[in-house]
Amino acid sequence: MSLDNALWLGYIAAEAVVIALLLLRRAWRLLPTFCIYCVCDLLINIGNYPVRIYFPDSYLNVYLTETSIDSVLQFCVLVELAWSVLRPIRASLPRASLFVIAGMILAVGAAIWPFSDMSSNHGDIRYQMHILLHLLQTVSILRILFFLGLAGCSQLLSLSWRDRELQVVTGLGLYSIVSLGVSMFHTHQPAGAEYGFLNQFVVISYICSLLYWVICFSQREAERQEFTPQMQNLLLAVAGVARADREALARKSVTDGQNSRRF
């Protein structure tokens, strides 16, 4: 058995175990989007292998489509993680808070996009590959920033390494660091034997993340701690300011519309 086949089987087996543990621990109640992401990733990787073997000419377009779907799902996972972190005060937040969080993460991703194109040999690669690498780099940077932000603010948010949110984002963050490094190398080096080795290294890093999740989800979830009163007041104050700004803009638009009708 070749190393590629062994890694593919190990990937499938590890992700299947993660999904089984997610079902066993009823994690869909807390992180349903993450559960959907894991199932979709498993199905994509099962179908990806025969496409690469039997339809190599179509593999790039198929992989680009899969990467786009995967990026959308990972964006939804990040939104879900951010929303889940706010569990202790969600009842006090405005109804539109989830959409505000999604908009903020999307805005960060949009800000990353122009600066994440690290390719120096655009003329040497196909347009689809250029878009694929650009998308992979953007999503990897977004995951890394989310991981660093959540880990850095873990004490303020009363999170520990036993909390599901920090466990999930840690697995994604560590894999993203390796994925970004390999993607940067791909864009600055000509194709060669090292391509296959580095891609194998990315797969190994994700298998390590899957094994980390296996260890985490094999244990019971820690009871979620409440925010400190100071942190609660700060988050609610930020939410209140955002809500007041939206209401002020709405009143202004109504007033402007009435004035325009008068004239």
Image (spheres, helix red, strand yellow):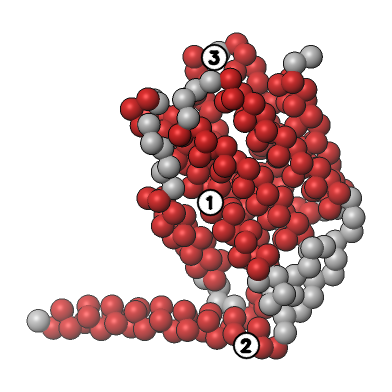
Which element is circle 2 on?
helix
Instruction: Give the CA distance from mark 1 to mark 3.
Output: 29 Å
The vertical placement of 143 against 103, above or below, is above
Residue sitting at the far top:
54
- For the residue marked with disc 1, what is the amino acid? Ile
Badge 1: how crowded within 10 Å, few (<14), some, or many (20+)? many
Q: Residue at x 75, y 32 (%)?
A: 11
Which image quarter holds the N terminus? top right
Instruction: State the residue position of label 2.
Output: 233
Select label 2 or label 1 by which is in front.
Answer: 1
Instruction: State the residue position of label 3.
Output: 56
Residue sitting at the far left:
263
Give 6 or 26, whichever is nearer the viewer.
Answer: 6
Q: Are marks 2 and 1 in contact (CB under 8 Å)?
A: no
The vertical placement of 212 against 94, above or below, is above
- The x and y percentages for residue 187 are 46, 34
Which element is circle 3 on?
helix
Residue 254 left/right relative to 2: left
